Amino acid sequence: MATEYTYEGISVGDKASFSKTISEADVSGFAGITGDFNPVHVNQVFAEKSQFKKRIAHGMLSASLISTVLGTRLPGANTIYLSQEVKFTAPVYLGDTLTAEVEVTEKNDKKKILTLKTTVVNQEGKTVVDGQAKVMKT
Amino acid sequence: MATEYTYEGISVGDKASFSKTISEADVSGFAGITGDFNPVHVNQVFAEKSQFKKRIAHGMLSASLISTVLGTRLPGANTIYLSQEVKFTAPVYLGDTLTAEVEVTEKNDKKKILTLKTTVVNQEGKTVVDGQAKVMKT
Amino acid sequence: MATEYTYEGISVGDKASFSKTISEADVSGFAGITGDFNPVHVNQVFAEKSQFKKRIAHGMLSASLISTVLGTRLPGANTIYLSQEVKFTAPVYLGDTLTAEVEVTEKNDKKKILTLKTTVVNQEGKTVVDGQAKVMKT
Amino acid sequence: MATEYTYEGISVGDKASFSKTISEADVSGFAGITGDFNPVHVNQVFAEKSQFKKRIAHGMLSASLISTVLGTRLPGANTIYLSQEVKFTAPVYLGDTLTAEVEVTEKNDKKKILTLKTTVVNQEGKTVVDGQAKVMKT
């Protein structure tokens, strides 16, 4: 079963993370599911002429790793995702290894709502996604 | 090829959209790419006992359809995704047909940055994702 | 990061599990990766005439959920998979929800080898895969 | 259609095989279907620091090629997979070309059960999976 915390068992400052390498297959698959065939993701020739010089992963793919941590690690199952704000701060290239991390920054005990700082960094420690989530833990 | 506008060719009020039905294969695939095996998405038995009563799609999958519109329709290729804010306002079930729509609400001519209202609605017209994006058009 | 135990932190009797619903997309994808296009998995017409009366999932797909538990939960990362014995005791149909469970039954402290009872059950509690694994925890 | 033998048409000593190159897409896809995101399979940075020095394929992916031979070549369609024992004897790296081979070693005519020696070797002839299967041919 997925890890699961109770609302009471979670404290401000608690952290969790998830890591994976973003393969070409992941980017192809993400394009296929979402329909986001922006040429900078799926067209090597186009990408080489762009400012990025090579294909980059979808920003929302990187951002989705935050959901992975929230839904499977902290708070885990029975978390209701209320909102997510993300800034895309650096490009992610095929083959980059990303680590999504969430940290609880605030608890609203009345509504059982948690605010979390959410970041995704690459293998060099550079932040590629920065933002904040709000979730309700039932 | 993707549609492509110049920055100057885009006006406040311009709109574009993208629609697709979210299949079980999409949800399985999205879990597989992101690692988000939250049981409410991939475990039918768990989902039936949850408040949702059946499996729901990942919120970030629905939100990613916004990126599809931005990167392939308006503004289209050569758009740099700067940020995205989303609120998840209603659950999305397997088989739902979603329409993501973006509308330009503000232009910052100096920085060539556009602000867009971004929404995703289901086949009944119910808003499932609400928010705002900022992009730079190069 | 994946859960990780030290060899010393694991005791005989420790258990862990992983659950998911086996979708048609999973079976199609598994066939595509392995090349196992046995008609009972990918041919609806053939399957209806077979003793199973409908399409069944690949036995090795069900068995692979055992590896998921071993490699991500107990013992978790840095586990070396030495061997697996499985008996396929009942068919798995598309839409079945499986739970793979492992239980430590023996420790060989000299070689740091663990023996685990490994089972996969469906949503009705029926055992579909039964067997035993040996792993080394580094 | 898959090749199909009758039980009587199969003799001890009969062999069949199936070969394919294991791509990064195969490993990403297998993780996505099974949920096995063990970092040695999906995290390049982690894998480089492990004893394997680079990402390896899931052992059960290699083992599943045995099922491909059994279900599509020998004995082919209408084979009931009863059991499989595997030893994982060497790591499989992305880009390795595997050949799964099965050889009939015993026939139980009363129960129509075949025992087969099952091996998977890489492009250098090194055995990566070794074991035995039992199947019933209907």
Image (cartoon, coloured by chain):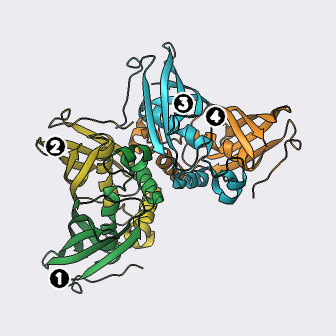
Chain colours: A yellow, B green, C cyan, D orange
Circle 2 residues within 10 Å: few <14, some 14–19, many ≥20: few
Q: CA distance from mark 1 to mark 4?
A: 63 Å
Give the structural element (helix, strand or loop) at label 1. loop
Separation (CA) of disc 3 from disc 1: 59 Å
- From the viewer's perspective, is the residue at label 3 or at label 4 nearer? 4
Q: The N terminus of chain D is located in which quarter?
A: bottom right
Q: Are marks 1 and 4 on the same chain?
A: no
Tell me which amino acid carries mark 2. Lys
In the rendered image, residue A12, in percent from the top left (x then y), is placed at 14, 37
Q: Earlier in the sequence, mark 3 or mark 4?
A: 4
Q: Residue C119 has which mark?
A: 3
B77 and B55: which one is in front?
A: B55
Q: Is residue D128 above or below residue C115?
A: below
Q: Position of residue D34 (x, y in %)?
A: 50, 44
Marks 3 and 4 sit apart, C-alpha to C-alpha, by 10 Å
Q: Which residue is mark 4?
A: C89
Left or right: A66 in relation to B23: left
What separation in Å lies between label 2 and label 4 (alpha carbons)? 44 Å
Instruction: Estimate how packed mark 3 is, as few (under 14), some (14 to 19) or many (20 or more) residues with alpha carbons within 10 Å.
Output: many
**The residue under label 3 is which amino acid type?**
Thr
Dot 1 and dot 4 residues touching (CB under 8 Å): no
Whether labels 2 and 4 share one chain: no
- The tag on residue A112 is 2
> Which kind of residue does numbered mark 1 sit on?
Val
Q: Which mark is residue B12?
A: 1
Res A125 seen here: no
Chain at numbered mark 4 = C
